[in-house]
Image (cartoon, coloured by chain):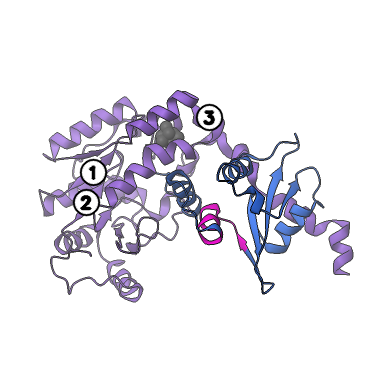
């Protein structure tokens, strides 16, 4: 059961969330944060060590005890670890670090080495180092706040709303609400904020890194490339391995199929 | 109940990674004898039965599962974990559950 500071304030049925989305979509990230930090007790910001630092800056001005967690996959850049520590000190945060299950990482690395993702695809490693620990952390929260924005990836984030029921991590008896206060902001707005308020930022951004993930799986991208193009770039062929799409078209165009249609 | 598993066979004659993994798991759970047929979607032959079934049921990735119940209705399962739960009442492993979450939410890794 979600613990709301004011139980009347936010209802979590789909219709109420849609109405809340319509209301929040026109509000500034700061106003959204002010509202949600007041309403939820078990709520935390997810900080990836990148531009989402602006959320911490905004939230710390509202509530200096705001909860922030960071997932340490064990494979982040040295610059990112230093930056995370800098943010911790700058905002005097009790940053909650979340680590993967050591036994699972140990088993993966012992079986396949440190770079299995270059052969087997990234999903197995991401599942162990990111998704499982994130799921464990989120099971302790009623709501979380992310820096996801619509302009980050037109194919997967174009419709990111300001508020949503997190269908990936909710369970039948534990609904989880996800707030994306920057959903409607552009990268330009984020950087205007960073400059205007002298927010500390990860030095990797100065070297062309837009999104910042694990060191072996993230690379700098060119202006106008999509952020996801900076991740797992070697995988296009591998990901298609189990796909049936191309041949579905071929099967539909095959002599047998054409004969069946005529 | 009639159960068909469609696996993809690559040009080198080997099953695709996910098909191999799922069939291995079905084997280790002792469920293979309950699979009526394993059909190939042969990358070298777009007319192979597996591709025809994929086109018929609009499935875009292997493996997938066709379950014909006693009334004659055919249900398509694209998610292995759900197939395991609903057809065999078996709990998927946490790794399978996570793999499925990631397949259904293609942005989960982007953190
Ligand atoms: S991004 Fe790369 S190193 Fe990081 S968890 Fe995923 S596969 Fe592993």
Q: Give the residue at mark 2.
A: A44
Q: Give the residue at mark 1.
A: A69
Between A22 and B29, the one nearer to me in the picture? B29
Answer with mark 3 or mark 2, whichever residue precedes in sequence: 2
Output the letter for the chain in purple. Answer: A
Instruction: Give the letter of the chain under mark 3.
Output: A
Q: Quadrant of ligand 1?
A: top left
The CA distance from mark 2 to mark 1 is 7 Å
Q: Horizontally, is B24 left or right of A51 in the view?
A: right
**C-beta proximity under 8 Å, tags 1 and 3:** no
Q: Give the residue at mark 3.
A: A118
Between A170 and A225, the one nearer to me in the picture? A170
Residue A58: image x %, image y %?
18, 51
Task: State whether discs 3 and 2 lie on one chain.
Answer: yes
Q: Residues within 10 Å of mark 2 (few under 14, many from 20)?
A: many
**C-beta proximity under 8 Å, tags 2 and 1:** yes
Say which colour chain B has.
blue
Quadrant for the N terminus of chain A in the image = bottom left
Answer with mark 1 or mark 3, whichever residue precedes in sequence: 1
Residue A3: image x %, image y %?
18, 64
Quadrant housing residue A105: top left
Residue B94: image x %, image y %?
42, 46
Where are the magenta residues, as a range?
B76-87
Q: Residues within 10 Å of mark 3 (few under 14, many from 20)?
A: some
């Amino acid at each position: 059961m979600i613990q709301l500071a004011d139980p009347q304030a936010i209802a979590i049925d789909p219709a109420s969330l849609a109405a809340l989305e319509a209301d929040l979509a026109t509000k500034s990230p700061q106003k959204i944060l002010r509202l949600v930090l007041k309403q939820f007790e078990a709520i935390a910001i997810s900080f990836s060590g990148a531009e989402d630092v602006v959320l911490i800056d905004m939230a710390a001005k509202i509530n200096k005890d705001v909860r922030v967690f960071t997932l340490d996959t064990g494979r982040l850049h040295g610059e990112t670890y230093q930056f995370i520590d800098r943010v911790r000190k700058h905002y005097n945060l009790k940053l909650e670090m979340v680590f993967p299950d050591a036994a699972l990482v140990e088993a993966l690395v012992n079986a396949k080495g440190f770079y299995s993702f270059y052969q087997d695809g990234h999903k197995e490693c991401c599942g162990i180092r990111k998704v499982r620990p994130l799921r464990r952390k989120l099971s302790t929260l009623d709501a979380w706040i992310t820096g996801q924005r619509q302009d980050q990836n037109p194919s997967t984030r174009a419709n990111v709303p300001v508020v949503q029921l997190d269908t990936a991590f909710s369970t039948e008896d534990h609904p989880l609400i996800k707030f994306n206060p920057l959903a409607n902001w552009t990268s330009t707005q984020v950087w205007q904020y960073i400059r205007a308020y002298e927010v500390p930022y990860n030095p990797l951004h100065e070297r062309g890194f837009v999104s910042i993930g694990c060191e072996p799986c993230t690379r700098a991208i060119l202006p106008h490339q999509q952020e996801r193009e900076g991740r797992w770039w070697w995988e296009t062929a591998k990901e298609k391995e189990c796909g049936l799409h191309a041949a579905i078209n071929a099967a539909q165009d095959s002599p047998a199929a054409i004969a069946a249609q005529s | 109940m009639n159960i068909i598993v469609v696996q993809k066979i690559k040009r080198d004659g080997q099953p695709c990674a996910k098909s191999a993994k799922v069939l291995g798991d079905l084997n280790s759970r002792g469920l293979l004898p309950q699979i009526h047929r394993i059909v190939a979607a042969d990358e070298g032959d777009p007319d192979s039965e597996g591709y025809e079934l994929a086109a018929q049921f609009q499935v875009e990735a292997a493996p997938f599962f066709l379950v014909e119940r006693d009334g004659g209705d055919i249900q398509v399962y694209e998610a292995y974990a759900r197939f395991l739960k609903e057809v065999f009442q078996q709990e998927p492993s946490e790794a399978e559950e996570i793999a499925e979450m990631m397949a259904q939410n293609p942005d989960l890794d982007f953190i």
